[in-house]
Image (cartoon, rainbow, N blue to C red):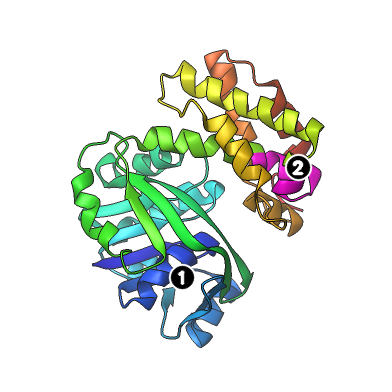
Amino acid sequence: MKIAVMGTGGMGAYYGGYLAANGCDVTFIARGEHLKSIKTNGLWLKGDNGDIHISLASATDKPENIGPVDVILFCVKLYDTETAANAILPLIKDNTKVISFLNGIDGPERIENIVGKKHVVGGAAYASAVIEQPGVVRYKGTKGHFRIGYLDGVGNDRLREFQELYSSTPIECEITNDITATLWDKFTLLATNSGLSCLCRKPVGVIYNDPSLLELARNMMEEVKLLALSQNINIDKEIIEKSIAWSKSAPSDLYASMYHDLKKGKPLELGGMSGYVTKLGQRLKVPTPCHKTVFACLKPYINGE
């Protein structure tokens, strides 16, 4: 099975790196100093399972030179979706699967508009990994996990071969028949923590152990849950309590990924987080005052500094 990773940031390097380390045919699409370091020194994964060095990692900034592949792990930032989707068109053959690991909700549909619906598989990533320096990715935890599935729930049996590739890694690939519900479950936490981490400049655990901030977080999650329910999405009834419990016990140094971009002066995925909640709320006539306020406060930083 031939695999390409579109966007070799923390998540792309983590999920693709373990496959490459196990001998799979993986090509990493990257750019800048990160690409230069990977081509010169290989790709390093460093974290709680020890260090892994893919010394001969295949990497390029020219997707068109890779040729058709079987699976594409689509791991770019939301604001790069359309550009990246057009860039991978030369990699797609009749049965190529494009697994979207984009943050937010509407990423898979945006990819579908360019590459075609039959190719796109929804994905929800549950791991913490960031670029520590060019060519080096730092991950947290001893076990990774992600869920995948076609948006219509049909044809998931075609994902079994890809799932099996992770059987000898510390990463679990789970196939679900309702990836839409999974994405909304994750988004309830992600949109809330992304906004609060950036506003407070504090780790997740600190935020959720402050009573006033906990109340705000709960209200933000309620807004997302109401949006899902208004669309008859089968969101987990206990998702808010589960999300709060997880956040309270989060590692003391864990920040939402959007905070790392804010800290580095990079563009933010704000439009796909509180911005998306605000716009969808207006369209569905569901009040979202907390996310609307968070979006307004962070909007000056949306394009970076």
Give the extent of the magenta segment: 193-206
Element under label 2? helix
Q: Residue at x 56, y 70 (%)?
A: 48
- Name the residue type under label 1: Asp
The x and y percentages for residue 296 are 75, 31
Q: Which residue is mark 1?
A: 61
Looking at the image, residue 79 lies above or below residue 222: below
Q: Residue at x 49, y 51 (%)?
A: 126
Instruction: Tell whether 82 sits left or right of 304.
Output: left
Q: Residue at x 41, y 61 (%)?
A: 171
Question: Tag on residue 207?
Answer: 2
Element under label 1? loop
Looking at the image, residue 21 lies above or below residue 147: below
Secondary structure character of the magenta stretch overall:
helix
The x and y percentages for residue 303 are 69, 47
**Considering the image in quadrants, where does the N terminus appear?**
bottom left
Of residues 290 and 5, the one drawn nearer to the viewer in this rendering: 290
The x and y percentages for residue 36 are 54, 80
Magenta stretch: includes residue 237? no
For label 2, the crowd category at 10 Å Cα-Cα, with few meaning under 14, some 14 to 19 and many 20 or more, is many
Residue 105 seen anywhere in this rendered image of the structure: no
